[in-house]
Amino acid sequence: MRSILVVNAKGGCGKSTIATNLAAYYAIKGKSVVLADYDPQESSLDWLAERPADRAKITGIAAHRDGLRVPKNTDYLIMDSPAALHGRPLAQLVRRADAILMPVLPSPIDERAAARFLVEIKNLRRVVNSEVRVATIANRVRDNTLAAGSLYEFMGDLKLPDGKKMWHLAALRLSQNYIRAAERGLSIFEFAPVKTLPDREQWARTIRWLASIENR
């Protein structure tokens, strides 16, 4: 089983959007997927409740309330974390993860919050799971804006504890496709390709990076 944690201590950065689209991507590839919602707001589970019965199955767990018992033969565990996650609760999720994806919005407030949180993640990796891979995703980006340029520069300067640059996987555009998908319990991967081609292309590097971890 592969475990992917979507995390950022700051709320409103799109963790549930990343988690639900990733869960659906693997489900439509025929994988057994569990979507564990650690957020009391249950945004991921609300999305799953709207999911049509004829779509690829995803098993939802209210992990914040019921704990996490992953069914046997699960291929992918996607963990949607809550905001304001620090200390021991954060360490417990990092311990479970093979990969960590951190969405960041293009604003100075989000960049500063992300920088502080990444320091905490790096310190945890030394104690909890030094093998877990960490990468960032720029989310809700408007290209050719000052905010986007600042965010790309910020992410380009991020480094891992060994001094190597941290992976920056994607810049996901501010797209109505994500809103339409969220309303219907779907993902951008389940709309007609011609309508979501730019969004699918932006996800490609993230999917390849996660695949490379599986093949280690």
Image (cartoon, rainbow, N blue to C red):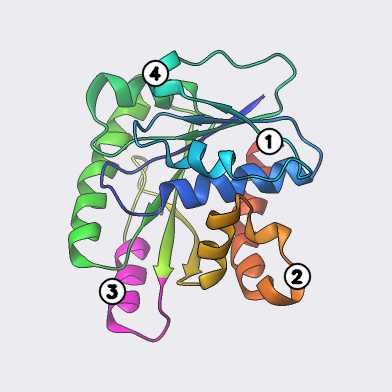
Is residue 150 highlighted in magenta?
yes
Residue 61 lies, with reference to residue 80, above or below; the image says above
180 in relation to 102, above or below? below
Q: What element carries label 4?
A: helix
Q: Nearer the viewer, residue 157 or 82?
A: 82
Return the residue at label 4: 65
| Sequence-earlier tag: 2 or 1 | 2
- Residue 162: x and y, percent? 37, 41
Q: Quadrant of the N terminus?
A: top right
Secondary structure state at the residue bearing disc 1 = helix
Q: Nearer the viewer, residue 102 or 215?
A: 102
Other residues around mark 2 within 10 Å, as few (<14) / some (14–19) / many (≥20)? few
Quadrant for the C terminus, please: top right
Q: In this view, does 20 lie to the left or right of 174?
A: right
Work out whether residue 100 can be spotted: no
Q: Earlier in the sequence, mark 3 or mark 2?
A: 3
Does the segment drawn in magenta span residue 135? no
Label 3 Cα neighbours within 10 Å, binned few <14 / some 14-19 / many ≥20: some
In the rendered structure, which disc, 4 or 2, sits on the residue that comes first in sequence?
A: 4
Q: Which mark is residue 214?
A: 1
Residue 41 location, quadrant = top left
Marks 2 and 1, how far apart in space?
A: 26 Å
Provide the residue designation for mark 3. Answer: 150
Q: What stretch is highlighted in magenta?
A: 141-156
Q: Quadrant of residue 215?
A: top right
Magenta region, main secondary structure: helix
Q: Are marks 3 and 1 in contact (CB under 8 Å)?
A: no
**Amino acid residing under circle 4:** Arg
Q: Where is residue 127 in the image (x, y as percent from the top left)?
A: 33, 20
Cα distance in 3D space between marks 3 and 2: 31 Å
